[in-house]
Image (spheres, rainbow, N blue to C red):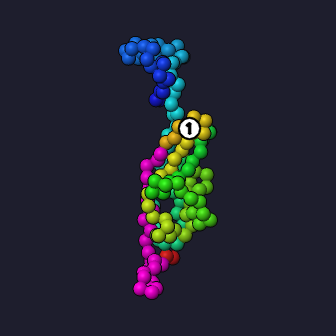
Amino acid sequence: MRWVCRGSDVYMFGRDMLFNFGIFLVIVGLHPCRPLDDFYFSVQPEDATAVAGQNVTLQCRSSREASLRYYWQQNGRAFRNTSRRHQVGSSLVFTRVDPEKDGGHFTCIAENTTTGFSLTSRGATIDIKCQSFRRSNGASICIGT
């Protein structure tokens, strides 16, 4: 578990004294610092491969669910829900993946709504394959299932 201390707690004692005093306080059940959130990702998003038009779900879950809010980013920007791609619980669901709109780097953020502390998952991408191409006005269009 990681600990976070208020500035006055840290400077009240020298480094060695704070360390020894901190151990003493932990042993007797007290501590001048408060624990930093101890949740972690129990399920991280993983890269996915799909044919254009198929459904894909990127999953994300924390070791603790109480007081957590999940949200997603695509290429470092807030992910916007639509009727075709949206968040369900902590997961991101894509109906009919589109190579032009659904490419990029996706990350899940879990935020403790009480403390504001947040964790960012490792990133995942969706590799969208085209089953065939159709030409329209000289441009290639990816055809899925």
Q: Residue at x 59, y 45 (%)?
A: 69
x and y percent of residue 36 in the render? 50, 31
- The span shown in magenta is 120-143
Total residue callouts? 1
Residue 42 visible here: no
x and y percent of residue 37 in the render? 52, 33
- Secondary element under disc 1, as helix, strand or loop, is loop
Q: Residue at x 50, y 70 (%)?
A: 98
Q: Residue at x 51, y 18 (%)?
A: 32
Q: Which residue is mark 1?
A: 116
The image shows residue 39, relative to residue 29, as above or below, that is below
Left or right, 20 with respect to 64, comes to left
Residue at the bottom extreme of this rendering: 137
The image shows residue 99, relative to residue 23, as above or below, that is below
Q: Quadrant of residue 126?
A: bottom left
Q: Main secondary structure of the magenta part?
A: strand
x and y percent of residue 71 in the render? 56, 50
Amino acid carrying mark 1 in the image: Gly
On whether residue 145 falls in the magenta region, the answer is no
> Is disc 1 surrounded by few (<14), some (14 to 19) or many (20+) residues within 10 Å?
few
Q: Quadrant of residue 92?
A: bottom right
x and y percent of residue 25 in the render? 50, 14
